[in-house]
Amino acid sequence: MSQSTYAVTGMTCQHCVASVTEEISEIDGVSDVVVDLPTGAVQVTSDVPIEASRILAAVTEAGYQLAE
Amino acid sequence: MSQSTYAVTGMTCQHCVASVTEEISEIDGVSDVVVDLPTGAVQVTSDVPIEASRILAAVTEAGYQLAE
């Protein structure tokens, strides 16, 4: 099992949280996504390590950004 | 035709705008809803005047508040 945390910017409400959670959850192998709205921390749990580029693509698709 | 503007607080993003628009649009007689996110102004156009209590109920259902 693999667990990584990403910093996502631009989320302002629970709808935003739901959008990011949904997009990341659609990645093959992802078993859990936990978002902390105040900090923008997104914890991704997966069966195998997920390439960061796939997380980036999902976050972008949802309409948000990864922090630098 | 009737047009009224309400001040809604708590909307932070376009998802919020969509939720409020959707709930108010479901009220019988409402033909158009225009939301200005920066100010929270919600302009409701309807065939007949809509009771404010129904707008309040819709805004509350969406998860937001009418400003005092």
Image (cartoon, coloured by chain):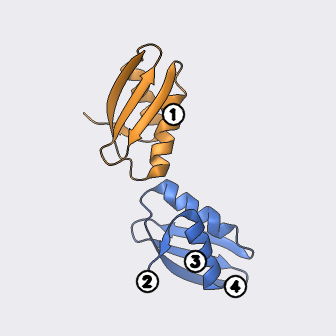
Chain colours: A blue, B orange
- Same chain for the residues under marks 3 and 2 in the image: yes
The quadrant holding residue B42 is top left
Q: Is residue A50 above or below residue B30?
A: below
On the image, the x and y values in percent for residue A32 come to 64, 71
Decide if residue A44 is in sight here.
Answer: no
Compare marks 4 and 3 and give the one earlier in the sequence.
Answer: 4
Q: CA distance from mark 4 to mark 2?
A: 26 Å
Q: CA distance from mark 3 to mark 2?
A: 11 Å
Q: CA distance from mark 4 to mark 1?
A: 42 Å
Residue A56: which disc?
Answer: 3
On the image, the x and y values in percent for residue A56 come to 58, 77
Task: Chain letter for mark 1, please.
Answer: B
Q: Nearer the viewer, residue B64 or A47?
A: B64
In front: label 4 or label 1: 1
Q: Residue at x 60, y 66 (%)?
A: A61
Q: Are marks 4 and 1 in contact (CB under 8 Å)?
A: no
- Same chain for the residues under marks 4 and 3 in the image: yes
Please name the residue that numbered disc 2 is placed on: A68
Compare marks 3 and 2 and give the one earlier in the sequence.
Answer: 3
Q: CA distance from mark 2 to mark 1?
A: 37 Å
Q: Residue at x 33, y 42 (%)?
A: B40
Q: Amino acid at mark 3?
A: Leu
Residue B23: which disc?
Answer: 1
Q: Are marks 2 and 1 in contact (CB under 8 Å)?
A: no
Q: Amino acid at mark 1?
A: Glu
Q: CA distance from mark 4 to mark 3?
A: 20 Å
Please name the residue that numbered disc 4 is placed on: A1
Q: Are marks 4 and 2 in contact (CB under 8 Å)?
A: no
Q: Amino acid at mark 2?
A: Glu
